[in-house]
C-alpha cells in the first residue's frame, strides 16, 4: 500500500476562479523520493503546499489526500494540525526567512517539539543536538542560541533538516530547498538530503527546478507544466528517454548548460549535482 | 543596551546644536527689530533712534552673534529663555505650565490613538478584504482628509451647543478633555491604524508564518508572534507620533481655548513675542529628538537585528 | 504617457484626477467663473440663504460664498502648488549638485538635509511664520524651506545611480556631453518618486495652509481663502453653523482627491507595494512619509 496517495487534486483561485492545477494524482510509497520538477509558476509549490493545506486563504483546493489511510482533506483545521510537522514536515526554500526573526532559533525548535511530543526539555535538547551534529552543524548549542539573522541560509536549511530528523515524519516536503543557496552550500545541503534518506525511513517530496539535483536524489520524477503533470516515471528513465517534448526540452537545456560548463571548466566535472 | 543608548544620544547631540543654532538665527531673520517690539509693547509713545539703541544694548543685541548664541544656549539649558516682550514675565513661567497642559492633552490622546489603532489594525489585517476592513479603511481615509478644526467646530456645535453635554472650552473638568481628545484621536488614529495594518499584513505574508503553520503551530500563537514583530515598527512610529501630536495640537487648543503651548504660540506669533517663539521651537525640537531616541532605543530592545548591528 | 493611461484604468484615481484638474482650472479662471466679485459686501444680504443669484448664500458681510469659494482656490490650492513646485526645483537643483559633484559639497548638503528631515515640519512652519510674521507669503516660504530636502534626497540618489550607469560612461567615452544626457535620464527616472512625494505632501500642505489661516496666521482679512472663510464663520458658529459647511467640504473634497491620487500613483508606480507584503521596508518607508502628511493639519 502506498504511504501517500493524492487523487484528483484540483487547485483554483477562489476569487477569480482561475484553475491553477486542474487534476493531479500521484502516489508515494514508504521511503521513496519523488521529485516534482517544472519551471517557476508550473504549480509545483502549490501542489506540495496543498498536501498540508498551507496555501493562502484565497486559494481553494479539492481532491483526496490520503496519508496512511486517513483522508487529510476531510479533516478539520484543528484535526489536521497534529499532522503538520509530526507526520508531514516541510523544509522551506529560504532558510533566512523561515524563522521568526525575533526569537533565537532554539526557542523556536523547542516550541515545535513541545507541540508534538511530551519530552522533557533536556530530552529535546539532546535529540536536537544529535540531529544537528548529524547534519554537519558543529556546536549545536551555539546555533540554538543564535537569532536567525546571525546564521547563514545554508545553516538554517540544515536546522530545518535537523528538526525534520527529530520529528521523524512520514513524509518530508522540501520546497526548492536549494534554490536560495550558493553552489557550494547547495551541494552540501543536497548531500544532507541524500544522507537523510539513508538515515530515516521518511518518504520525500522534493520540489525543484534543478534537474541536476533531482537526478542525484530522486527515485521518481513528476514533470509539471502549467499545472498539469505532463510526464512521470523513474528518474533514470526520464533523463535518457523522456517521451513528452517538454521533458526533453528541460533535459536538453540542462545538458546544454552542463556541457557548456564542462567545456569552460576544461572537461573536469566539478559540480556534479 | 546602555552603550547603544549612549551612542544614539551621542549621534543626536550635534543635531540638537544645529537645531538650536537655527532657532537662534531665525530670530535675526525677523524684519522687525526686537528692540522696536519691546518698546511698542511697553507703550513708549515716540520711539527715537537713541531709545532703540539703548534697548538693543539692554537686550544685549550689540554683541557678536556667536557670543549671544552661546549665552542664550547656556541660559536655555537652565530653562532661562529670557523675558517675554509682551508681558515682561520670564518665558519659562509662561511656557512651563502651557507645556504641562499640552503634554496632558497629548498623552491622553496618544494613549487612545495607540489602543485604537493597534486594535483596529490587527483586526483589519486578520480580516483583510472583508467588509470590516474595507469600511474601517474607507472611514479612516476620509477622516485623514478632514481639517481638524472643521471637525472640531462640528463637534463643538453638536455636542456642546445642540446637546449641551460637554464643555466647549477650557480644561476645568475631566469632561473638557473629551472633545479635544476626540478630535486629535480621530485625526491621527487613521494614519497609525494604517501603519499597524500594513505591518501586520506584511508579517502575515512572511515565510516564517508559513513554516510555523507547517510545523503545526496554532493560529493563535502565530498571530501573537506576528503581532510582536509588527509592533516593533509600531513602537518607533508611535515614538515619533508623540512629538508630532504635541506640536500639532495648535489648532485644537485654539478652538477649545486649551491653555497650552499652541494657544501660547499663536498669541506670541500674533504679538511678535520672539523669546517665547524661540523657546517654543527649541522645546519642541528637543522633545522631538528625545522621543526619537527613546523610540529607537525601545525598538532596539525589541528587535535583536538592530541591537547587534550597533 | 503610459503612466496616465494606467492611472486612468483606476476609476477612483481618474475621478480624483478630474476633481483636482477641475479645481485648478476653476481657480485659474476665477474671475471668469465666479458669479460675483469675492469682496463685494452687501449688508442687506447678511446670512442670506441659497438663492438663484447667490447659489450658496451669503456670509456675515453679505458676500457671495460661492465666489469666495472659487477665489479661495487660488491661495488654498494654486499657491500651495506653486510652493511645492518651487521646493521641487530648489531641491532638485541642490540634489543634482550634491549627486554630481559628490565629495564635500555632497556631505554638507546631505547633513543639512538630515537636519531638515528630522526636524518636525510644523515647528519649522510656525518658527518661520513666527519670526517673519503672519501672512501667506511667509507660510509659502516656510513650505519651500521645509520640503526641498525631500526632493534633494531623491534626485541625489538618482543622479548617483545614473552617473555610474553604463550608457552614461559610454557617452563620456564618446565625448558627448554627459551632463545633457544625465539631465534627461534623471528627470525621467526620478519622476515617479518625485511625483509620489509631491502628491503626498500636497494634501497635507493644503490642510496646513488653511489651518494657519484659520488661526489668523495666514492670509490677510478681506481676501478669500478657505481657512479664512471658516475663521470668519467661527464667530457665528453657534447660531449659523452652516457657514462652516461649504469651505470645509471644499477642503475635504480636494484633499481626499489629492490623497486618493497620491495612493493610486504609488500603486501604479510600484505595483508590488499594492500586492504583496514582501517589501515591508519600502512600505514602511512610504508610511513614514505618509505620516508627515498629517503634521500640522
Image (cartoon, helix red, strand yellow):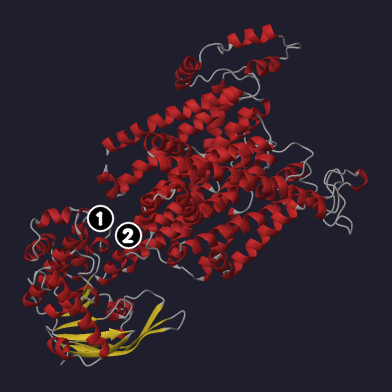
Q: CA distance from mark 2 to mark 1?
A: 9 Å
Work out whether residue C263 or residue A259 is closer to the camera in this orientation and state it: A259
Residue A215 lies in what quarter of the image?
Answer: bottom left
Identity of the residue drawn at 10% across and 57% down:
A140
Question: Residue A191: x, y in percent?
Answer: 10, 71
Residue at mark 1? A103
Question: Residue A33: x, y in percent?
Answer: 15, 82
Q: Secondary structure at mark 1?
A: loop
Residue furthest to the right in view is C44
In the drawing, what numbered circle is on residue A259?
none
Whether C150 is drawn above or below C220: the answer is below
Question: Residue A122: x, y in percent?
Answer: 10, 60
Residue B39 lies in what quarter of the image?
Answer: top right
Whether B268 is drawn above or below A187: the answer is above
Identity of the residue drawn at 69% across and 9% down:
B49
- Label 1 environment density (alpha carbons within 10 Å; few <14, some 14–19, many ≥20): some
Residue B33 lies in what quarter of the image?
Answer: top right
Residues at marks 2 and 1 touching, judged by CB atoms closer than 8 Å: yes
Work out whether residue A127 or residue A146 is closer to the camera in this orientation and state it: A146
The answer to whether marks 2 and 1 sit on the same chain is no
Amino acid at each position: 500500500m502506498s504511504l501517500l496517495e493524492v487523487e484528483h487534486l484540483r487547485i483554483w483561485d477562489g476569487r477569480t476562479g482561475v484553475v491553477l492545477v486542474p487534476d493531479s494524482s500521484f502516489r508515494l510509497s514508504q521511503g521513496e523520493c519523488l521529485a516534482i520538477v517544472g519551471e517557476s509558476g508550473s504549480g509545483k509549490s502549490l501542489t506540495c503546499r496543498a498536501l498540508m493545506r498551507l496555501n493562502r486563504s484565497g486559494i481553494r483546493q479539492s481532491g483526496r489526500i490520503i496519508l496512511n489511510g486517513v483522508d487529510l482533506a476531510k479533516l478539520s483545521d484543528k484535526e489536521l494540525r497534529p499532522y503538520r510537522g509530526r507526520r508531514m514536515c516541510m523544509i522551506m526554500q529560504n532558510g533566512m526567512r523561515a524563522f521568526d526573526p525575533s526569537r533565537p532559533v532554539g526557542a523556536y525548535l523547542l516550541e515545535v517539539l513541545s507541540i508534538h511530543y511530551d519530552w522533557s526539555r533536556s530530552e529535546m535538547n539532546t535529540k536536537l543536538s544529535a540531529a544537528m551534529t548529524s547534519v554537519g552543524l558543529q556546536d549545536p548549542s551555539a546555533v540554538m542560541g543564535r537569532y536567525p539573522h546571525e546564521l547563514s541560509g545554508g545553516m538554517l536549511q540544515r536546522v530545518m533538516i535537523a528538526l525534520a530528523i527529530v520529528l521523524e515524519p512520514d513524509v518530508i516536503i522540501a520546497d526548492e530547498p536549494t534554490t536560495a543557496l550558493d553552489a557550494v552550500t547547495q551541494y552540501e545541503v543536497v548531500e544532507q538530503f541524500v544522507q537523510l534518506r539513508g538515515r530515516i525511513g521518511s518518504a520525500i517530496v522534493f520540489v525543484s527546478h534543478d534537474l541536476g539535483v533531482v537526478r542525484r536524489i530522486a527515485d521518481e520524477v513528476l514533470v509539471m507544466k502549467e499545472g498539469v503533470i505532463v510526464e512521470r516515471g523513474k528518474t533514470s528513465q526520464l533523463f535518457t528517454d523522456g517521451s513528452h517534448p517538454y521533458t526533453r526540452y528541460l533535459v536538453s537545456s540542462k545538458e546544454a548548460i552542463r556541457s557548456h560548463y564542462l567545456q569552460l571548466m576544461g572537461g573536469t566535472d566539478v559540480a556534479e549535482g | 543596551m546602555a552603550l547603544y543608548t549612549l551612542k544614539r544620544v551621542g549621534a543626536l547631540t550635534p543635531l540638537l546644536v544645529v537645531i538650536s543654532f537655527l532657532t537662534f538665527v531665525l530670530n535675526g531673520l525677523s524684519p522687525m527689530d526686537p528692540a522696536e517690539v519691546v518698546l511698542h509693547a511697553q507703550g513708549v509713545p515716540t520711539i527715537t533712534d537713541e531709545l532703540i539703541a539703548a534697548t538693543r544694548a539692554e537686550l544685549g543685541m550689540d554683541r557678536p552673534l556667536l557670543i549671544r548664541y552661546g549665552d542664550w544656549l547656556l541660559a536655555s539649558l537652565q530653562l532661562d529663555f529670557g523675558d517675554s516682550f509682551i508681558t515682561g514675565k520670564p518665558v519659562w513661567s509662561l511656557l512651563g505650565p502651557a507645556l504641562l497642559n499640552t503634554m496632558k492633552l497629548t498623552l491622553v490622546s496618544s494613549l487612545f490613538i495607540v489602543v485604537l489603532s493597534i486594535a483596529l489594525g490587527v483586526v483589519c489585517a486578520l480580516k483583510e478584504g472583508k467588509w470590516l476592513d474595507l469600511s474601517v479603511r474607507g472611514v479612516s481615509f476620509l477622516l485623514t482628509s478632514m481639517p481638524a478644526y472643521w471637525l472640531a467646530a462640528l463637534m463643538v456645535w453638536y455636542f456642546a451647543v445642540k446637546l449641551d453635554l460637554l464643555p466647549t472650552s477650557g480644561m476645568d473638568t475631566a469632561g473638557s478633555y473629551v472633545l479635544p481628545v476626540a478630535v486629535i484621536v480621530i485625526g491621527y488614529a487613521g494614519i497609525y491604524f494604517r501603519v499597524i495594518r500594513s505591518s501586520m499584513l506584511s508579517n502575515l505574508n512572511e515565510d516564517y508564518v508559513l513554516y510555523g503553520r507547517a510545523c503545526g503551530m496554532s493560529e493563535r500563537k502565530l498571530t501573537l508572534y506576528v503581532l510582536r514583530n509588527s509592533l516593533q515598527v509600531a513602537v518607533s512610529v508611535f515614538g515619533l507620533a508623540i512629538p508630532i501630536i504635541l506640536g500639532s495640537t495648535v489648532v485644537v487648543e485654539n478652538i477649545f481655548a486649551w491653555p497650552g503651548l499652541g494657544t501660547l504660540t499663536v498669541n506670541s506669533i500674533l504679538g511678535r513675542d520672539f523669546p517665547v517663539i524661540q523657546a517654543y521651537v527649541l522645546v519642541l525640537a528637543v522633545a522631538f529628538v528625545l522621543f526619537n531616541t527613546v523610540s529607537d532605543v525601545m525598538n532596539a530592545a525589541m528587535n535583536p537585528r538592530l541591537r547587534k548591528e550597533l | 504617457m503610459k503612466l496616465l493611461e494606467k492611472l486612468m484604468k483606476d476609476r477612483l484615481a481618474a475621478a480624483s484626477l478630474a476633481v483636482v484638474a477641475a479645481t485648478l482650472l476653476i481657480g485659474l479662471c476665477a474671475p471668469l467663473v465666479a458669479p460675483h466679485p469675492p469682496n463685494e459686501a452687501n449688508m442687506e444680504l447678511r446670512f442670506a440663504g441659497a438663492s438663484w443669484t447667490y447659489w450658496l448664500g451669503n456670509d456675515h458681510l453679505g458676500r457671495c460664498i460661492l465666489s469666495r469659494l472659487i477665489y479661495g482656490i487660488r491661495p488654498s490650492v494654486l499657491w500651495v502648488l506653486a510652493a511645492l513646485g518651487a521646493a521641487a526645483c530648489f531641491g532638485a537643483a541642490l540634489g543634482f549638485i550634491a549627486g554630481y559633484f559628490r565629495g564635500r559639497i555632497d556631505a554638507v548638503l546631505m547633513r543639512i538635509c538630515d537636519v531638515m528631515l528630522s526636524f518636525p515640519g510644523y515647528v519649522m512652519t510656525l518658527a518661520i511664520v513666527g519670526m517673519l510674521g503672519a501672512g501667506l507669503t511667509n507660510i509659502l516660504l516656510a513650505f519651500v524651506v521645509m520640503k526641498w530636502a525631500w526632493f534633494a534626497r531623491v534626485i541625489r540618489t538618482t543622479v548617483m545611480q545614473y552617473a555610474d550607469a553604463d550608457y552614461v560612461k559610454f557617452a563620456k567615452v564618446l565625448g558627448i556631453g554627459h551632463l545633457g544626457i544625465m539631465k534627461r535620464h534623471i528627470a525621467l527616472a526620478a519622476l515617479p518618486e518625485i511625483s509620489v512625494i509631491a502628491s503626498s505632501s500636497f494634501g497635507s500642505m493644503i490642510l496646513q495652509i488653511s489651518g494657519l489661516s484659520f488661526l489668523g496666521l495666514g492670509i490677510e482679512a478681506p481676501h478669500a481663502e478657505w481657512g479664512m472663510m471658516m475663521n470668519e464663520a467661527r464667530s457665528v458658529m453657534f447660531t449659523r453653523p452652516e457657514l462652516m459647511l461649504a469651505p470645509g467640504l471644499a477642503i475635504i473634497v480636494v484633499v481626499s482627491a489629492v490623497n486618493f491620487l497620491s495612493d493610486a500613483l504609488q500603486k501604479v508606480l510600484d505595483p508590488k507595494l499594492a500586492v504583496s507584503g514582501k517589501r515591508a521596508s519600502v512600505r514602511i518607508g512610504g508610511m513614514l512619509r505618509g505620516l508627515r502628511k498629517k503634521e500640522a493639519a
